[in-house]
Amino acid sequence: MTMSSTYSTRIKTTWNNESIAAEQFISISMHYSGEDLIILIHAPFYNDPVLPDWSKKPGTFDKLYEYEVVELFLLNSQNEHYLEIELAPRGQYLLLELNGYRNVTRTPISLKSYDVKIQHDKHWSGRAIVSNDDLPYGIDKFNAYAIHGSGSNRTYLSLFPAPHNNPNYSEPDFHRLELFKPISLFHPYH
């Protein structure tokens, strides 16, 4: 019998720790059994900025962070090796392997699969499978983020946000590894 672990959470704050309305919450679940990582997303759909519909043929999309996206960062805090996973509501995704702050060492990385569905133009759900081979060894910390909107309406959300009104955090930076929190989902498997 294969054992598996599940971690579920919701993003409820902006990048700088301001509360958001309940209808803006983003649900994230991760399932891991020592093999592939399954990620489930349920989020509001803003369609801003607009992306083409790739839902029938999902694929990698450069600079996806400039659009509407949910992001997960999985970190080995001992060596600062981490995987950035960006998932968009219209089938686009982007995976980046990094070693140290913003130091990309490999991209593009393909998902095993990515399925998305938009419900009534109000919400979207996604199911992504990340190959175990693409996960950093020894993942012990993570963070999750979401971005949507254009121009002055650009909104940055964070699961583990920067402290409110802290001058050391003057703008959104999802690569601030010191903000990541422990996760035991990958133990004892990885």
Image (tube, rainbow, N blue to C red):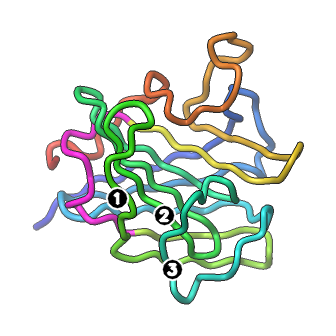
Residue 172, horizontal then vertical, whole percent = 66, 32
| Residue name at image x 48 percent, y 38 percent | 143
- What residue sits right under mark 1 in the picture? 31
**Residue topped by disc 3:** 58
Residue placed furthest toward the bottom: 56
The correct choice, above or below, for 28 with respect to 116 in the image is above
* Residue 118 percent across, percent down from the top left: 69, 77
- Spatial CA distance of label 1 from label 2 is 8 Å
**Residue drawn at (60%, 59%) of the image:** 64
Locate residue 137, reporting x and y percent.
Answer: 19, 44
Left or right placement of residue 116 versus residue 151 in this view: left
User: Which residue is outermost to the top?
Assistant: 167
Q: Is residue 169 magenta?
A: no
Q: SS of the residue at dot 1?
A: strand
The disc labelled 3 sits on which kind of residue?
Pro
Q: Are marks 3 and 1 in contact (CB under 8 Å)?
A: no
Decide: is 168 above or below 95.
Answer: above
The first of marks 1 and 2 along the sequence is 1
Select label 3 or label 2 by which is in front: 3
Upstream in the sequence, badge 3 or badge 1? 1
Inspect the image, locate mark 2, and give the three-letter code of the amino acid beneath it: Leu
The mark lying in front, picked from 3 and 1, is 3
The quadrant in which residue 66 appears is bottom right
Q: Residue at x 55, y 31 (%)?
A: 160
Residue 116: horizontal and vertical position, in percent? 57, 76
Q: Kindly indicate whether the residue at mark 2 contacts the one at mark 1 (C-beta within 8 angstroms).
A: yes
The tag on residue 40 is 2
Nearest the viewer among 133 and 151 is 151
Magenta residues? 129-141
Q: Amino acid at mark 1?
A: His
